[in-house]
Amino acid sequence: MKQKSKWKKKIAKFLSVMLGCVIFTTAIPIYASEQSTCKVTIVDELFDDDGNIVDSVVRQEDEVANGTIVRYMPTYYEGYTNYDSQKNKNTIYQEKITEDTTVYYRYVPGYCKIEARYLLFDVTELTEDEIYRIGNTYWEDGNDEELCQKLHSDTWEEVGEYRAGDIAEIKAPSFEGYKLVTINSDEAGVWSDVITRKCYSDYVKAVLPDEYKTEYRGEECAGGSNGGFSPTFLYVLDTDDSGSDAGIGEDIYTIDLSETGTTLSNDKFTELLRENVANDVVIKSSNNVTFSFEKGKMSVVEGIDSYDFGTSVIVNYTELSDVPEYVTENNFISKIHFNYSGKLPATASITFYAGTDKEGQTLYYYLCNADKSTTLIQSVVVDGNGYVTVKQEHCSDYILVSEELKEKDVKIEEVNKQETTTVETNTQETTTVETNTQETKVTSEIKSPKTGDNTHVELYISMICICAIGLLLVGMKKRLQ
């Protein structure tokens, strides 16, 4: 009976030890799991207009406890906008982290379009009070009858498309019979015929895939601006009787096509030929481009029934196409496209805007050939108002640059070869670095188990339990003997 009681005690003791081992073994993984951490990586991807990635930036790396709720917002890049906000998606990432996570933000070039407003008044001058009312109260109520009676026309015009982050320079155009009175520049109390605007994005051009690597939730970020208030130019009647700016002057016949359409019909061109017998002919076209023909020089071009004197001017390098590689962002000034292509009725002096910041500089005017080569037409000096004047007998596509492009087309192939060799060398070096990185990573993983890995702990505990059971059985056997 005594022997049986001893056995019961030993069995009870054994079961207590086993229960303690089970509880201990269960508790260790829970404790380790609660103490493990996760890595959160924030990556910003920058794309071009065609949706090609141009840069990938690891903006932030955080170690957080397992189960932590994290919150990240997109950042600001000059000239770029966060693509998700443009698609009316939420751009703030908020999530409970339970494993290593990478959050991707996508950025694409942002653009804005700027409109200018032209107010033409049928008076010879505007008082300071009237100018103040135009800028501060006229737009708000529209009930300033005195100003409304003097107003001849109120015109809006899109003056250009600009990349976000750029400074837009808007030049006041000319209107027949009117002269520019004043506009307020960015500097208080300073007046000029050019307004500058800092451009902010209100739309994007890039096209990206619809699928996203990360789900965005939470609040929406505020959208961009279209570059602030529209520039406004004020004009009054021109009292200058010299005839040098508008209408039929003493020796100049001027026609303004900037508002009425840029194409001259055959009848209208015949009229110009008659006027050219005794007068110089000046044709004002779109984009502040002016064509001037000397007296008695104009004639009919065989096979041409009408002339389109319209133009388009590109000043943003990213919008260029069909130009040689040696026309770079550093030397490019502008590209001018003439709607009319072919021989002109006479040699024309063509004036267009290059920028007041280039006053006194020598620039170079090149013809863009069909094979993407260029031909120098002439060098020009920028005048005090930021304009250049070139002479030509034909119209096509032309570029204005800040340096001579001569011989660059000959050297470009050699430069490309050198760049290709450099890229290949860099690629090999990068491959070596990646291989070493992988080897280092593998070695690190072998030497240092990840935080929160409980496999070895459980194994050790199981071995201890087995040893304890073995020792207990050996002890029991000896006592029975």
Image (spheres, helix red, strand yellow):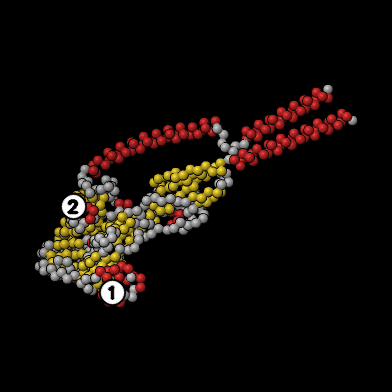
Find disc 2 in the rendering and name its residue: 360
Image vertical order of residue 48 relative to residue 280, above or below: above
Between the residue at mark 2 and the residue at mark 1, the CA separation in whole angstroms equals: 40 Å
Image vertical order of residue 451 relative to residue 90, above or below: above
Q: Amino acid at mark 2?
A: Gly
* Residue drawn at the location 39% of the way across and 46% of the way down: 54
Q: Where is residue 57 drawn, in percent x and y?
A: 42, 44
Image vertical order of residue 318 relative to residue 64, above or below: below
Q: Amino acid at mark 1?
A: Leu
Q: Quadrant of the N terminus?
A: top right
User: Is disc 1 placed on a helix, strand or loop?
Assistant: helix
Q: Nearer the viewer, residue 346 or 149?
A: 149
Find disc 1 in the rendering and name its residue: 147
For residue 28, side relative to residue 356 (left or right): right
Q: Residues within 10 Å of mark 2 (few under 14, many from 20)?
A: some
For residue 420, side relative to residue 101 (left or right): left
* Residue drawn at the location 56% of the way across and 43% of the way down: 65
User: Is disc 2 placed on a helix, strand or loop?
Assistant: loop
